[in-house]
Amino acid sequence: MNLKNICYGVTMLVTVIAASGCTILLPAHTKSNMTRGDQVVLAAIKCEDNLNEVFRDNYAKAFPGRSIQRSCDRVFIPTKRYGECVVIDSTKGPTKALPALAASALIGLGTDFVKKKLEEEKTLYTAQYKKSFQDDQFWKSVIFATEQNTDCISAETKNQSSRIGTQKADGYVLKPNYIGFELKRIIKDKEENDPALRVLYGLSLASDGRFFLLKPLHFEMNYAKAKILSNQVGTWFFPPTLLMKLFKISKNTVDIELDFNMKAYWTAQGKEYKGPETIAAFKTNISGYDLSNSDKYGADKLSNDGGWLLVPPISDAIEKYDGKPAGNFDLKIIVTERDTSEATKIIETTEDWVSKGGKKLQEMVDKKD
């Protein structure tokens, strides 16, 4: 093969790489693809903490009519009931449930390089990270109590449906230790008040004392870990991406999924430990979040994504906990970020084009030889 054919092969290879550059060099949003020096932190928010205005305001929106103080008050859990269920008000209705060789080599190496870069590029448009928090003090204190008045349901008869009443019971009084949780992703060299991600969750104790209603209160994302295809003005001067922008392929937006999962660890009386039980599991989805604006979402935009949390049970031999904290749990939150553009589809199409294009180039070189 002469020098002319080698030069021709190289020229055609450059054309392949240049053309595929419209995906390999897809411009990332300046606030995305932030992966270096990041740290994910998950912490519990205690009832006794000095709660900030953001938490308090959004708690009131998420749980109207329910106060933080009420959710942090002591709750009585009966373990033994005795006596009859005395109906409080007979007018009340039934209770309800809760809820050429050189040129050939150049072309082969070049197309392999491009395809490798395309594969690497695809993985950038989805990012996932997680953080766990373990503790053995969900309850700040456990105190024995006897002869407490508790709610009960009277027996149903032929002439009378079941009614709400009171009944004496022994049990223990639990005082909640936490009122919520905070998840943050922090970027090195960024200000403390400029987190990449911040999510606040709030807990509201149910009337039966057996469950907490759990809701996201606040969400903000200032920097994405996933690569988000940019539609910023500065990227309009790159010819391949200009065409993409004209067809509105990039929107500067990201979809976020927050996966909340909590497990409890305890031993039931007379039974061996058989592993943790899931006591809360729900997801919050935020679609089309504009990274350019980085709006702060409050409870009014997030409150529909709540779930129920079964209070962490206490192991048997409860006398060991009298006056002490208890309640073992393991909380894990997984965050998934996805670019909303069609960048991945474009890359997959280009991969196919590069593979076929490499073969065509080889045929052209062979004919020129």
Image (tube, helix red, strand yellow):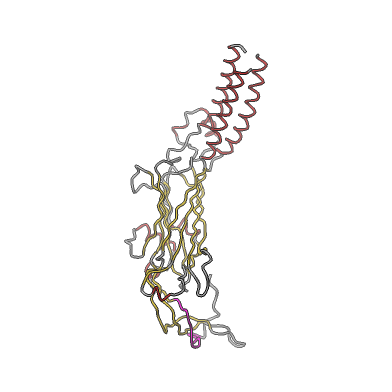
> Measured along the vertical axis of the image, is residue 353 above or below residue 177?
above
Quarter of the rendering containing residue 76: bottom left
Q: In screen coordinates, is 212 left or right of 55?
A: right
Residue 137 in the image, given as x and y percentages of width and height: 40, 66
> Measured along the vertical axis of the image, is residue 319 above or below residue 230?
below
Secondary structure mainly formed by the magenta segment = strand
Residue 49 in the image, given as x and y percentages of width and height: 33, 62
Quarter of the rendering containing residue 345: top right
| Quarter placement of the C terminus | top right
Q: 79 or 273: which is nearer to us? A: 273
Residue 297 in the image, given as x and y percentages of width and height: 43, 53
Whether residue 84 is in magenta: the answer is yes
> Measured along the vertical axis of the image, is residue 108 above or below residue 37?
above
Residue 119 in the image, given as x and y percentages of width and height: 56, 36
In the image, the segment drawn in magenta is: 77-89
| Quarter placement of the N terminus | top right
> Measured along the vertical axis of the image, is residue 76 above or below residue 247?
below
Q: In screen coordinates, is 322 left or right of 23?
A: left
Whether residue 144 is in magenta: the answer is no
Q: In screen coordinates, is 139 left or right of 116?
A: left
How many marks the image carries: the answer is: 0
